[in-house]
Amino acid sequence: MVQVIKPYPDAWYCSKVCGSRCCKVADVWTLQGEELSYEFWKANYPRLGKSTCGCLDENGLCIVHDAHRPLICRIFPYFRFEDAVLASLSCKYVSEVILPSINSHIIRDSLFREVLEYIDCECSGDRVRQIEQRLRECKGLFLLIRGNRD
Ligand code: SF4
Ligand code: SF4
């Protein structure tokens, strides 16, 4: 029987297992023309010595509701890059849950399909291109995932 692996970590994993690592590095990209909530800007306006996103509450959960979060936060840890998916290896869920299971082609195809469906819903072609450009300049480590969409 093939194990079912969810592509995205849930809130419990992010807050309790990972400790909300990606919200503590102050590297949230925002894209040109992206509308963000006033709450987000008020909390995150760059300040000297600030490293944790101001929208993270004391339980390690994001206080900004889904549609108002920056796009990068909504799709992280996956990005569409040309005909592939890049998964950020700085994400604990990617390095500890996805990476060890991806050599099964059934899991890889299913993950590839689900992630692309989600990203295609969230991102216009223009946004995908803006993200690809940022990824070309990014020094982070990524897992390249290609699979069968059919
Ligand atoms: S907006 Fe929310 S998801 Fe994005 S970095 Fe801040 S706390 Fe994390
Ligand atoms: S780094 Fe990955 S596992 Fe950790 S909080 Fe971010 S999305 Fe969740």
Image (spheres, grey):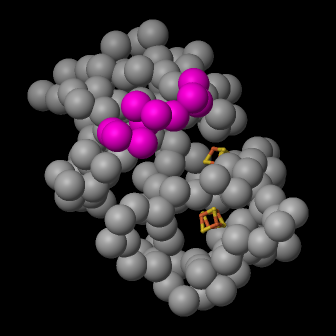
The range drawn in magenta is 132-141
Residue 72 seen in the figure: yes
Question: For residue 133: magenta?
Answer: yes
Which x, y percent locates residue 52?
A: 78, 62
Q: Residue at x 70, y 57 (%)?
A: 26
Q: Residue at x 87, y 63 (%)?
A: 49
Which x, y percent locates residue 7?
A: 46, 39
Question: For residue 128: magenta?
Answer: no
Q: Nearer the viewer, residue 139 or 2?
A: 139
Specify the quadrant of the image occupied by residue 57.
bottom right
Which x, y percent locates residue 145?
A: 37, 22
The answer to whether residue 11 is above or below residue 41 is above
The answer to whether residue 60 is above or below residue 77 is below
Specify the quadrant of the image occupied by residue 111.
top left
Overall secondary structure of the magenta stretch? helix
Q: Quadrant of ligand 1?
A: bottom right
Which x, y percent locates residue 85?
A: 35, 31
In the image as oriented, which residue stretches furthest toward the left? 150
Q: Nearer the viewer, residue 27 or 46?
A: 46
Q: Residue at x 42, y 42 (%)?
A: 134
